[in-house]
Each structure stands twice: as C-alpha cells, then as structure tokens.
Image (cartoon, helix red, strand yellow):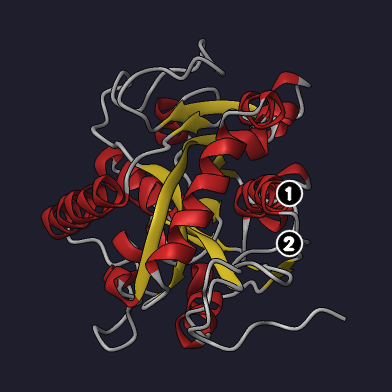
C-alpha cells in the first residue's frame, strides 16, 4: 500500500499516493459530475488514483469545513461552488460563513447557468403565467444559500408572485421532486435539466444569464421577460490554505492538461458547461463582485434567504 509522504516533504515527489477529491453535494448533480471529470483527468496526468468522496450538506459548507481542516499537502482537494462564498454568507451569521481566504484557489473550472422549469402538468410556459395563476407557487431549489434559491426568490419578488421555497440537498433530489410533480417549479443548473427539457418531461420558463444560452436558444432570459434577475454558478479547484507552491503548480498543470483534452471538452458540451478556466485572482475578483451585487439586490427587495 502506498503511503503519503510526510507533510512538507515535497522534494518534487508529489504525488506519491492517491489524491482525494471531496464534493459537497450528492451524486448525480453538476458539482459531482464536474468533480469526477476533473478528478479522472488529473489522476491520469499525475499517474495516481483520485477517489471522489461525496459529503453533501449545507450547500457544500460541511465538505468545505473538512477540507479547511485537512493537511495542506495536496492529497485532499475539492472543486467548490461560488454560491458557498457569495450567497450562503447572506443566510448565516458571519461566524458560520465559509470564507474563500481559508483556501488556496488553484484554478477556475467552469460556469453553469440556471434554468427555472416546471412539470408539463402545471400548464406554465413563462414567468407571467405563474403571476396569472393566482396561487402560492411552491418552488424547489438545490438548497438554502444556493444560486437556485437566490434566482427564484428574486424572480418571485420582482414579479410580485406569492411563493414558498422547498429546499433540497443538491440537484438530483430537486430534479426528482419536479419530475414527480411534488413542487410547481424548480430552478437548477441547465446541465441537470436539459435532458428532460429536450425529452418533453420538463418545460423551461426562464434562464438567469445576461443573454440567452446556446444550449437552450429558444428559452427567454428573465431579463427579456421584464424581470432583472441575473445569477450564474461557477466552480473552481481548491486546496487547504498553506498548500506548498510546488504542489499547487503540479495540480494546476494537471488541470490545464485535462482542460485541453478532447474528452474533457466533450464533457463540458454534454453537460451544458461554459469553460471558466481562469487564474485564481480572476476567481477571487468574481467572488467579491458577486457578493456585493447579491447583497445589494437582497437589501433592495428586503429578501431573506435564511430558513
């Protein structure tokens, strides 16, 4: 059995054992699929195994806390969601909020846009249809403090629609509930919904990007429908704070080589993902900008995402 080298003993020997990827969401959702695709590529480039461990809970906060406490030796890393750092802090006390400066950002990975969809049985085809329904809309989200919750809450508030959130722990259970008609509408990542949309099992009502999404070119943005709501999810590779430079450099090089492979590019296309393979500083800048924008929006409309 291969053993990890002692901490700090990184004389160019990294990695000499398995690299564990943790993912703060259940299996089958976008975070899980992206983590597995990246782990597979990095494992191949570095010549080791890269098991993926699912640790769902609190929009990734449980997995993040575990990563934060791990040895900074490069043997435990994770793809993390922007929403954990830009939206979740708006739902918890400052002491509970996960902070990006507790981690090393290795590289940006990809962007994932949101779509609000409904079961065909609802009869809805637009945001305006929900407004005309004259009833309280029960909407599923991928969890408290997620972009799905924020996009939904802003939409219903700006449209003047009475609505109640039904949070699920991740994309897969949220999708299952919508397909089973247990909620009226759900907001989720496009990659999680597109197969069922194309198969006629779900009806898309709006996307929350600035412009229409190439993967769903016929679906109007919320902005086009008269509601100024723009929320996207993006992800980046992280390691515990204090991870040595040579280790970060090897992980970045392996990630870049993975991004360049035809297999990984095809994975992005198949899952409706837009590459966001940017530098750590660009990730940090985006997080700071979004945090300010989302807080201002919630304050403007008097929305609380907590509970």
Question: What x and y, as percent, mark residue 87?
Answer: 33, 61
Question: What x and y, as percent, mark residue 33?
Answer: 69, 47
Query: Quadrant location of the C terminus?
Result: bottom left
Graded by Cα atoms within 10 Å as few (under 14), some (14 to 19) or many (20 or more), the crowding at tag 1 reads: some
On screen, residue 86 versus residue 256, left or right, reads: left
Nearer to us in this view, 300 or 76: 76
Nearer to us in this view, 294 or 49: 49
- The answer to whether residue 136 is visible is no
Separation (CA) of disc 1 from disc 2: 7 Å
Q: Are marks 1 and 2 in contact (CB under 8 Å)?
A: yes
On screen, residue 197 versus residue 250, left or right, reads: right
Q: Which mark is residue 50?
A: 2
Residue sitting at x 54%, y 66%: 12
Graded by Cα atoms within 10 Å as few (under 14), some (14 to 19) or many (20 or more), the crowding at tag 2 reads: many
Query: Quadrant location of the N terminus?
Result: bottom right
- The answer to whether residue 180 is visible is yes
Q: Residue furthest right?
A: 1
Nearer to us in this view, 106 or 2: 2
Residue sitting at x 38%, y 46%: 151
Q: Secondary structure at mark 2?
A: loop
Kindly indicate the quadrant of the structure image that contains residue 22.
bottom right
Q: Secondary structure at mark 1?
A: helix
On screen, residue 260 versus residue 212, left or right, reads: right
- In the rendered image of this protein, does residue 253 appear above or below residue 57? above
- In the rendered image of this protein, does residue 248 appear above or below residue 243? above
Residue sitting at x 70%, y 71%: 16
Total count of labels: 2
Identify residue for label 1: 40
Kindly indicate the quadrant of the structure image that contains residue 77.
bottom right
Question: What x and y, as percent, mark residue 73?
Answer: 52, 78
Nearer to us in this view, 69 or 4: 4
């Amino acid at each position: 059995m291969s053993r990890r080298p002692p901490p700090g003993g990184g004389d160019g020997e990294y990695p000499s054992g398995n690299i564990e990827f943790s993912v703060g969401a259940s299996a089958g959702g976008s975070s899980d699929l992206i983590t597995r695709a990246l782990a597979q590529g990095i494992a191949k480039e570095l010549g080791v195994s890269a098991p993926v461990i699912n640790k769902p809970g609190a929009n990734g906060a449980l997995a993040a806390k575990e990563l934060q406490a791990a040895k900074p030796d490069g043997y435990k890393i994770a793809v993390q969601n922007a929403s954990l750092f830009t939206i979740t802090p708006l739902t918890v006390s400052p002491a509970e909020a996960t902070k990006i400066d507790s981690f090393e950002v290795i590289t940006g990975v990809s962007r994932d846009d949101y779509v609000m969809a409904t079961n065909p049985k609802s009869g809805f085809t637009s945001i305006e249809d929900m407004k005309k329904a004259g009833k309280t809309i029960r909407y599923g989200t991928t969890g408290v403090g997620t972009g799905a919750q924020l996009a939904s809450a802003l939409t219903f508030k700006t449209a003047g629609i009475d609505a109640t959130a039904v949070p699920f722990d991740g994309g897969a259970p949220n999708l299952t509930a919508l397909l089973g008609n247990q909620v009226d509408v759900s907001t989720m990542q496009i990659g999680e919904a597109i197969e069922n949309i194309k198969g006629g099992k779900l009806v898309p009502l709006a996307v929350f990007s600035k412009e229409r999404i190439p993967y769903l070119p016929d679906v109007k943005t919320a902005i086009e429908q008269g509601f100024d709501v723009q929320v996207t999810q993006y992800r980046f590779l992280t390691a515990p704070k204090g991870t040595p430079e040579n280790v970060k450099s090897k992980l970045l090089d392996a990630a870049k080589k993975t991004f360049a492979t035809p297999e990984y590019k095809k994975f992005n296309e198949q899952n409706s993902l837009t590459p966001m393979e940017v530098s750590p500083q660009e990730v940090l800048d985006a997080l700071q900008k979004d945090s300010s924008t989302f807080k201002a929006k919630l304050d403007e409309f008097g929305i609380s995402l907590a509970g």
